[in-house]
Image (cartoon, helix red, strand yellow):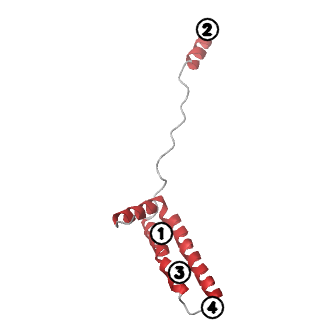
Amino acid sequence: MSAVGASEDSSSQSAPAQPAAPDSSPGPRPHPALFWVGLLLMMVSFGLYPAYAFIAVLPISRPSKVAAAFSAWLISWGSFSVGTAMAGAEGIEYLHRLWRRSGAP
C-alpha cells in the first residue's frame, strides 16, 4: 500500500463532520433607548383598548364611529408592531414577566 492510499483510508474512516449547532442567542441586544421606547409603544397599544368603549358612546354618526374605531385599531396595532420591532424578543419577554407578576391570568 502506498502512502497516498494509506492517507485516503485513514481520512475515510474518520467520523463524519457534524453540522454546526445553531446559535441559540436571540440576536443583538437593542440599544437601551430603543428598548424602552419600544416597550412604551407596546404598553400604549394596550392602553388604547378602553378607547373602543369610549368611541361606542360618542354622540357621532355610525360611520364616524366605525372610522374612529378603525383608526384606534390601526394606531394600537401599529404602535405594538413598531414597539415589538424596537424592543425585540427581550422586550416581549419583559412584558410577559410584568404580566405574570401583576397576577393576570
Q: Disc 3 and disc 4: Cα gap in Å?
A: 15 Å
Disc 2 marks a residue whose amino acid type is: Ser
Kindly identify which numbered label has been placed on residue 61. 4
Residue at image position (34%, 64%) is 101
Give the mark toward the camera: 4 or 1. Answer: 4
Q: Disc 1 and disc 2: Cα gap in Å?
A: 67 Å
Q: Disc 2 and disc 3: Cα gap in Å?
A: 84 Å
| Mark nearer the N terminus (2 vs 3) | 2
Disc 3 marks a residue whose amino acid type is: Tyr
Q: Is residue 38 left or right of residue 100?
A: right
| Mark nearer the N terminus (4 vs 1) | 1
Is residue 76 shown to the viewer in this render? yes
Q: Quadrant of the C terminus?
A: bottom left
Tag 3 residue: 52
Q: Residues within 10 Å of mark 2 (few under 14, many from 20)?
A: few
Disc 1 marks a residue whose amino acid type is: Gly
Tag 2 residue: 2
Q: Secondary structure at mark 4?
A: loop
Residue at image position (45%, 64%) is 31
- State whether residue 83 is above or below residue 64: above
| Mark nearer the N terminus (1 vs 2) | 2
Is residue 48 shown to the viewer in this render? no
Q: Disc 4 and disc 1: Cα gap in Å?
A: 35 Å
Kindly identify which numbered label has been placed on residue 6. none
- State whether residue 82 is above or below residue 23: below
Residue nearer the viewer, 45 or 38: 45
Residue at image position (58%, 81%) is 69
